[in-house]
Amino acid sequence: MGAPEFPPRKAIEDRGVLRFLTCGSVDDGKSTLIGRLLYDAKAILADTLRAVEHSSRKRGLTATDLSLLTDGLVAEREQGITIDVAYRYFSTGKRKYVIADAPGHEQYTRNMVTAASTADLAVILVDARKGVLTQSRRHSAIASLVGIRHLVVAVNKMDLVGYDQAVFERIRADYLEFARGIGIGSSDEIRFVPISALDGDMVVERGERLDWYRGPTLLDILEGASVAHDVDDRRRESFRFPVQYVCRPQRADDPALHDYRGYMGRVESGEIAVGDAVTVLPGGRETKVKDIQFDGRSLRRAVAEQSITLLLADEIDVSRGDMIVKRGAAGDRPPAVANAIRAKLCWLSATPLDPQRRYLIRHTTREVRARVASIDYRLDIATLRHLDATMLAMNDIAQVSFRLAQPIFADVYAINRATGAFIVIDETTNNTVGAGMIV
Amino acid sequence: MTARLPEPQALASRHGLGHLDWLEAEAIHILREVAGQCATPALLFSGGKDSIVLLRLAEKAFRPARFPFPLLHIDTGHNYPEVIAFRDRRAAELGERLIVRTLEQSMARGSVVLKSPGESRNKHQSVTLLEAIEEFGFDACIGGARRDEEKARAKERVFSFRDGFGQWDPKNQRPELWNLYNARVHPGENIRVFPISNWTELDVWQYIEREGLELPSIYFAHARPVVRKGDLLRPVTPLTPAGSGDAVETLTVRFRTVGDITCTAPVSSLADSVAGIIEETATTTLTERGATRLDDQTSEASMEQRKKEGYF
């Protein structure tokens, strides 16, 4: 393998970071696809490849098994399946990619939810020989539920169906019918690409055997996909600033800092400028933004995903867990101050949800005690049909209502992932046992 | 402080933050979560490039206040003197508290017993680290590990739970969703936090260049006596003298990673500047650990095994 070519620095627009997840059934060739992307994008280095070649030979394989690149844990290599989310990285010079490799095995659905929670895009692998399976439906439904707006259906193993266009078209039609049936696709973008992860056709290179396909390669789709919080999104989004940490230096050696109170956090959505009128929740005290600081400098404005420090015009008591929002700005709506929430809840723990117990809910930087008020229904994940439920076991997704000991400042998840998401913590083990999305 | 300087360049992009700004903002968010959620955290600072990046990120996260944690170094006693001098100077410049605990202290206590005087001390660091965690009651240790370093690390959480014995259980990790990190522990347990999990080696070097960060001199090309050992170069030092049959050569080398002398190998390089290193990193054909770590080569799962035992 030759030395990777690296594009000249500063020559191309920096399109930032795209996070995507790959999901598919066991043996759909997901790990092989990731291996192929990394290999063809020249993100695999010679010693890693040598180690994989060595492992392949040790397992008696004749060809190099690119899936060994991603199956990192001993137990996985023994069982030949992926049991935990693995993160992989590559960069094209135009964009940096974070791949969350979600396991296909049914019992690990919780890991797929985990991987989906930070992804902008999902690549759903379908085996060309098998078509759209229950597992593909589950993955698509979860991706949609977790708010991924871009779905790419990669029809893999085209080499095993003679690169037949009719097979690809049939799978596309099947998938679209299923997607319409459960309501994905209305506001989401679904794209289809035929590939052979094993040989590399239409992954990074076009290859020569899929001439009938005129659309972009998988990598071209990734390069062009829009990420959350682009300029259009920011204009639509309301400003949300959960306070993470209050900075009060009070350094004896610097009297200028004696009255300094900086509110540190990350802009979760929207944008903010010096002089903007804001409200601090809870309590609803009103003031203005006096300064926006970053690394000892003052900024005129800050936008979604920036970690900054806000200074306010009035001295008011603000602490971690409070939220600063805009007041009276056109199109900027306040969040709900909620003592009760209804949410889609994915149960992540081997210990079932106990409706009699109290749990902790962590929402933005706020932590409140909560009780289950009702389990409204459980979802059949393949069809999104409602089923009766009195309890929740690991990998179940249900609609659950909670009563909260203190209010949270929330938006509907479909509108704002950052202020619509929460995790459920079991105080006896301190484990994260549930993942919720407010409806 | 009052001058209105232009915002970071990347804001000009309609696609949100540029990749370094995005990584930086994420890391600052993680550091502030540690400060907000943990009672007695510490930041592991070795004088190596990844922990130098961590210190810069901590400045951006917490200034004008002091860091809400001390710096902690677990010193095997086998570090390059340039790196130790750099470590002390950097901590002093920042005005932050540096705690050093040494493997010798553990050996004197009897908790570390070397099989032979020449045995690598690297894996025994875990013992000294766990002793320091117990001594100071640290409930979180911030480290500069990255997921791109090694296969087992690729599956590690940003907030990674360790039990009372400091062990990592890869099959029973806490789910980590959105940016909602769970740092809750019972007494005696702790969390390891990796704010630059999502960075690659190239991202680290690009950040060092952009921020103009100073590094220990051994990161840059210099002449050094070495012995070839398979594909790797072994530095010839008082700790690692050449064997009787070894051919000692003086080559121009640099270190891609800086750790215990007995297990860190330099690479042939003429790169004497950060820009030169970025060029080499972008075109290298060997991974960072593969090119430089004499201890990861022993078996397919050597890193996973050491992490389960409490290693970083």
Image (spheres, coloured by chain):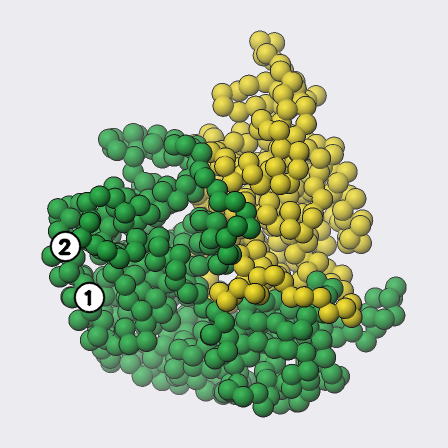
Name the residue at 80% across, 49% down: B92
* Earlier sequence position, callout 2 versus callout 1: 2
Percent across and percent down for residue A396 are: 31, 70
Q: Are marks 2 and 1 in contact (CB under 8 Å)?
A: no
Disc 2 is placed on an element classified as helix
Chain for numbered disc 1:
A
Which chain is drawn using green? A
Q: Is residue A269 above or below residue A197?
A: below
Q: CA distance from mark 2 to mark 1?
A: 15 Å
Percent across and percent down for residue B222 are: 68, 27
Q: Which mark is residue B284?
A: none
Q: Which mark is residue A175?
A: 1
Q: Colour of chain B?
A: yellow
Give the crowd class for mark 1: few <14, some 14-19, many >=20 residues within 10 Å. many
Name the residue at 24% across, 50% down: A195
Give the crowd class for mark 2: few <14, some 14-19, many >=20 residues within 10 Å. some
